[in-house]
Image: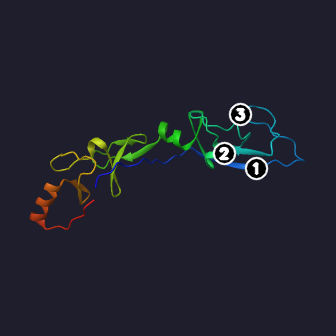
Amino acid sequence: RLMEGGRAAAARNVSSIQMLSVQPDTKPKGCAGCNRKIKDRYLLKALDKYWHEDCLKCACCDCRLGEVGSTLYTKANLILCRRDYLRLFGVTGNCAACSKLIPAFEMVMRAKDNVYHLDCFACQLCNQRFCVGDKFFLKNNMILCQTDYEEGLMKEGYAPQVR
């Protein structure tokens, strides 16, 4: 059955976030976000700098990065959460039909390990487009409609892979 696919991307500009306890006998560190001394019980260390928990935020959605995970993403002088990084800069990969790049924010169709633009997800013999819920077949990495698949079965006698 046909289903809408997800989104994926490989990010290169990833940095870790560490939460550290502030030792009472050490000199307070300066926050890279607000430039004030960090007098809290905990601080965050990221990008080789120290931050108040409230100061290390995503430049787009303002979420507190120490709360949403142990990584942050940087690009174009922005500090971002994973979701906003992928939305702004991510790439899903190449479409299995047209070989063009698929932006991370674009909806895709998937069949086994292949990813397709919505417009490219069609029978590769007759170009019939599929709707959600339609049956399609995968033969030798080719997407086929039921008619073309069954005609091929009659000619070649190959085994079905119904999806």
- In the image, what residue type sits under mark 1? Leu
Cα separation between marks 2 and 3: 14 Å
Residue indicated by mark 1: 20
Answer left or right for 154 relative to 24.
Answer: left
Residue indicated by mark 3: 33
Residue sitting nearer the eye, 67 or 85: 67
Query: Percent x, y for residue 127?
Result: 18, 45
Query: Percent x, y for residue 124?
Result: 20, 50
Q: Secondary structure at mark 2?
A: helix
Which residue ends up furthest to the front in the rendered image? 133
Give the quadrant of residue 72.
top right
Give the quadrant of residue 29.
top right
Query: Percent x, y for residue 5?
Result: 37, 49
Q: Secondary structure at mark 1?
A: strand
Q: Is residue 122 above or below residue 84?
A: below
- Name the residue rendered at 51%, 46% in the picture: 11
Mark 3 crowd level (few <14, some 14–19, many ≥20, 10 Å Cα):
some
Cα separation between marks 1 and 2: 11 Å
- In the image, what residue type sits under mark 2? Gly
Answer left or right for 43 relative to 77.
Answer: right
Residue indicated by mark 2: 66
Q: Earlier in the sequence, mark 1 or mark 2?
A: 1
